Amino acid sequence: MEILAQRFKALGNPHRVELMYRMMTCCAPGTRCSADQAARLCVGEVGDGLAIAPSTLSHHLKELHQAGLIQMQRNGKQVECWVEPTVLEQLASFFQGQVMETKK
Amino acid sequence: MEILAQRFKALGNPHRVELMYRMMTCCAPGTRCSADQAARLCVGEVGDGLAIAPSTLSHHLKELHQAGLIQMQRNGKQVECWVEPTVLEQLASFFQGQVMETKK
DNA sequence: CCTATAATTCGACATATGTCGAACAATAGA
DNA sequence: TCTATTGTTCGACATATGTCGAATTATAGG
């Protein structure tokens, strides 16, 4: 329940929930990426159009990462970000009365 | 997206997510109440066993209510609290890539 | 009307959060 | 090696949050 609260807290900010949504739905508007291959956005792309400083964007992505909601990996000059589908499934299941035992 | 963030923020506290879970699953352990009739707990019941002052409990329930997550209604000396199933469905649908237009 | 029960409101307080700009780090390419 | 690009880290700051106890409100029952 503690970890669950951490994850919801990370989503409890307008900028972060927007970032999360963009990463979840970066394949086609309003849809979710296929279950086996999550698409990736680099830091600059995912924050494009948001009226926040680069340092603030970096901070928010770090929060999402530390909460276990997103993955991050350096690729050349850029850092790629994506959402693992299992994370979405676990969170959705809470609202169906299931409390998953999330590790980490 | 703003309203969504408000709801997740309300769930972003260990005590509040615990309270929410109790209200969601007050019929049978690990299950959700039937779709048409949400079961109700009074304020004292829902906070039973949590190591927080009554004033803190009241504060948390107010937060959940203001975020649109729970309903509250006075019944005699007590105040009943419950979760509308539609709220749960809307929140779950976010993690399937759906952003619902939540009023209020 | 008085009392007990159930819950809320109201300061007060320590701590956490969101934001910025400046400085720094990592990488690619000329 | 120098430079431009892409992100991160580090204070600093104003504001928000979680908590409590004391006082208050609402109700039911003598």
Image (tube, coloured by chain):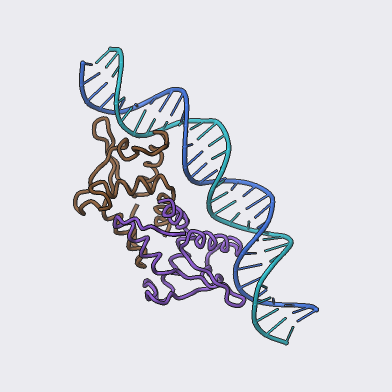
Chain colours: A brown, B purple, C blue, D cyan
Is A92 or A98 nearer to us in this picture? Answer: A92
Instruction: Say how many tags the image has.
Output: 0
Q: Residue drawn 53% across and 68% down?
A: B47
Give the quarter of the image for residue B39: bottom left
**In percent of the image, x 32 and y 37: which residue is there?**
A43
Q: Is residue B32 left or right of residue B16?
A: left
Is residue D4 found left or right of C8 in the rendered image? left
Residue A37's x, y, as percent?
19, 49
In front here: C9 or A78? C9
Rendered location of residue B20, percent (x, y): 45, 65
Residue C21: x and y in percent read 47, 26
Q: Residue at x 50, y 73 (%)?
A: B41
Question: At x 43% / y 66%, what residue is drawn?
Answer: B21
Identify which residue, A63 or A12, lies in the foreground.
Answer: A12
List x then y, in percent, for residue A1: 41, 60
